[in-house]
Image: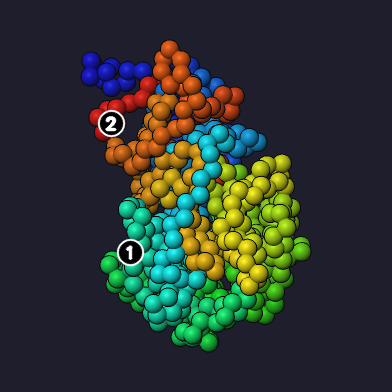
Amino acid sequence: MRQSQEKNAGCIGYWPLGTDSKDYSGLGRHGAAKGNLTYEEGAVFDGVSAAVELPDIPETDGSRPFTLSLEFEVNDGKGFFPGGLASRYSETAMEGWHLSVLSQAGVTSSQPNWRNAQFGWSSGKSPIRWKDWGSPGDCRYICSMCVYKDSLYVGTFDDASDNRGHVYRLGKDGVWTDCGTPDNSNSVWSMAEYNGKLYIGTMKYRASGSALPESPNQERGGSIYRYEGGKKWTLFARLPVENNDSVGALTVYDGKLIAMSFYPYGTFAFSEDGSCESLGSPGPEGKTRTMTLSPFRGQLFIGCNEKQGVSARTLDEPWADSGAVAKCDQVYCFSVFHNELLTGIWPEARMLRYEQGKDWSDFGLMGAEKEVMGISVFNGKLYGGTLPGGHVYRYAGGGHEWELIGVLEQPDPNILYRRVWTMAVYDGQLFAGTLPGGKVWSLTHDPLATADASLSDGWHRATAVYDRERLSLYIDGELASTVAVPPQASDESGPASALSASGFPFVLGKGPQCHFSGRIREVKLFDRALAASEIR
């Protein structure tokens, strides 16, 4: 009994979520079930509307230390992103803290984040800092990104040594390690993690599409490779399409690795054993060139060229028109933010929000730019990369407002198009890759602790610790990441934090990206920062 009392010292909330959302700590901080919430070995969250609203608990507003611990199981097999486990976050202010599992697809050609747990606090008070990580291989283009097994991997176009597409891994020492050339083509265009392995797609990139001289290397791509470590790659499949030369995008949907051709049309679903099912192509006669892929709430969405807008399907049903997007010739990216599907387009750098059916609404312009490409949710805010200026914008709210926060490619009268093509969240930072400089940059802002290895299937325990000086994230009892918070002032109890979530809603099963899809149980809240030994 004494050991149990010591273990639970300072417990100020306990929600088992076995059959209801009541608080069993004895303090009466009962939750209110919202949306389609059910109970089966925990609370079952549908990824659409289910949530548990908790009362205002002042111990979690940033003014004092706290620890939140819970068990969870992700259910993303049918095209749902995991989303938020718990948060005190305002969608209007885009501030507050969140404990989330981040998956992102449709970041142009890549699925850069897959089941990455995070504990972050968005305040807007930390300085914006950009860091130049150089050009791996002195390449011309960072084509793809993926966070895999605690490292950031990038795919390149036109490595200076051989004009081939390489894969590079960023080391903790800031040095790029060459992971080899999967084939002889000029670019590693797409990346995704699938069933615990890193997969890449190759392409014969036509640089004239970016108003640049063509690569002297015109070898065909169009193959998918699986990474075996070091510089070793295993051929997984070639796309079974006529005149195949490109794998334009990769993502995971409904237990399959989905691959899209970029120049010839065609989309394909691969099983882990390499067996393939053709999903065809949307549009008139099924002959539309497509640009990007992303799952969303049970369907696979595809962005089209040739003014065809967006289409969607399941593995069992054919492509259906999801709307011809206004003022749009090309759809380049998808993102899920504040529980909504967004897309970025050309020939004006506009974001649009999906309103179901075939309807899309305006989500604002990124300055006078012409195209949105890389797009990423990063610690409670949404960021987008553009062409022709090579800019990065951040969503400022109000449904339409975006603010310029970075210029990653400097103006050059000899260069018509400068791109920020791809993005990924890694090591508490937002990474972005460019053309024609072929550089990788990272943005550091508000504190974000990230677990940069994907979560396996089954139950896990996440523990978020805030001691007013640091945010720490533990997964299954082991420290995944810790990060300092910006100091503001001091009082009798020690340094004060610049972080605050006062007045923001406290919710289980919801975060900045979207509602949670999966199950949560055994939620405990403490009014102190638990030690690592207690968490273990």
Disc 1 marks a residue whose amino acid type is Thr
Give the quadrant of the C terminus. Answer: top left
Residue under label 2, please give it: 532
Q: Where does the image place residue 314, in percent across and percent down from the top left?
A: 56, 64
Q: Secondary structure at mark 2?
A: helix
- Between the residue at mark 1 and the residue at mark 2, the CA separation in whole angstroms equals 33 Å
| Residue at the extreme top of the image, as rendered | 492
Q: What's the mark number on residue 310?
A: none
Q: Secondary structure at mark 1?
A: strand
The answer to whether residue 362 of the structure is visible from this angle is: yes
User: Which of pointers 1 and 2 indicates the residue nearer the eye?
Assistant: 1
The answer to whether residue 83 of the structure is visible from this angle is: no
Viewer-proximal residue among 345 and 419: 419
Above or below — where is 190 with respect to 99?
A: below
Disc 2 marks a residue whose amino acid type is Ala
Q: Is residue 451 left or right of residue 57?
A: left
* Residue 271 falls in image quadrant: bottom left
Residue under label 1, please give it: 177
